[in-house]
Image (tube, rainbow, N blue to C red):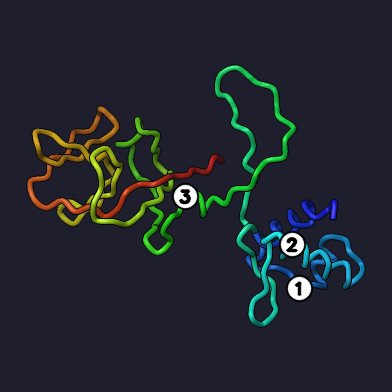
């Protein structure tokens, strides 16, 4: 039981490489358990904690908590602070950022018109598809059959799309403006 965290880490790494969970026999070899009973006990404990589940044909699949990642204490960006020894809570990134999976799309950002809002070229924005938005929301809008990512703003009673980079002009639609969705989050991968 003390090694369950390490065993789960190996299963997560295996899943990341193969996009499937291993068989019971392969789990034993992967985590260093020699008996079938030990593997079965491990799987039962992981099921009880919500990390794995069984499919109808008795294969293993990731459970609700399988993709949880440790959420450690906050970290200062200024002066260093003492590290905490508390064990971190888990957080599923998908659960945190995606409230409505059927209405959520990911879009890769091109261009730098939103850089002052912290949205950089190559970032992936999480968009919740909806046809309305609030003033101040960052939206994906459709103007003349073209998509753009801007902040929804109001100017003299009219809706405009405001870039977050002074090098770009405010877009003042003359025709139709359609809201495709609202930005609810973003992520980027550092290389």
Q: Residues within 10 Å of mark 2 (few under 14, many from 20)?
A: many
Q: Residues within 10 Å of mark 3 (few under 14, many from 20)?
A: some
- 41 horizontally vs 59: left or right: right
Q: Which residue is mark 2?
A: 46
Number of numbered discs visible in the structure rendering: 3
* Residue lying at 40% horizontally and 38% vertically, measured from the top left: 120
Q: Secondary structure at mark 2?
A: helix
Q: Which residue is mark 1?
A: 23
- 110 horizontally vs 50: left or right: left
Residue 58, position in %: x, y? 70, 79
* Residue lying at 79% horizontally and 57% vertically, measured from the top left: 7
58 in relation to 149, above or below: below
Which of the two residues, 158 or 149, is positioned nearer the viewer here?
158
N-terminal of the pair, mark 2 or mark 3, is: 2
* Residue lying at 56% horizontally and 41% vertically, measured from the top left: 191
CA gap between label 1 and label 2 equals: 14 Å
- 2 horizontally vs 175: left or right: right
Q: Which residue is mark 3?
A: 97
Residue sitting at the far top: 79
CA gap between label 3 and label 1 equals: 31 Å
Q: Secondary structure at mark 3?
A: helix
**Disc on res. 99:** none
Please tell me whether mark 3 or mark 1 is closer to you in this view.
3
CA gap between label 2 and label 3 equals: 25 Å
Q: Secondary structure at mark 1?
A: loop
Residue 123, position in %: x, y? 43, 44
To which quarter of the image does residue 66 belong? bottom right
Q: Residues within 10 Å of mark 1 (few under 14, many from 20)?
A: few
């Amino acid at each position: 039981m003390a090694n369950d965290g390490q065993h789960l880490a190996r299963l997560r790494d295996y899943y990341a490489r193969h996009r499937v969970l291993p068989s019971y026999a392969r789990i034993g070899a992967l985590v260093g358990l020699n008996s079938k009973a030990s593997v079965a006990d491990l799987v039962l404990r992981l099921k009880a904690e919500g990390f794995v589940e069984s499919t109808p044909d008795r294969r293993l699949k990731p459970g609700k908590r399988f993709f949880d990642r440790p959420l450690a204490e906050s970290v200062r960006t200024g002066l260093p602070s003492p590290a905490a020894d508390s064990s971190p809570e888990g957080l599923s990134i998908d659960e945190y950022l995606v409230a409505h999976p059927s209405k959520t799309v990911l879009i890769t950002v091109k261009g730098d018109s939103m850089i002052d809002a912290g949205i950089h070229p190559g970032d992936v924005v999480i968009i919740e598809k909806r046809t309305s938005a609030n003033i101040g929301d960052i939206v994906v809008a459709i103007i003349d059959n073209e998509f753009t990512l801007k902040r929804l703003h109001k100017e003299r009673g009219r809706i405009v799309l405001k870039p977050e980079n002074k090098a770009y002009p405010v877009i003042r639609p003359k025709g139709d403006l359609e809201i495709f969705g609202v930005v609810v989050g973003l992520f980027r991968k550092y290389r």
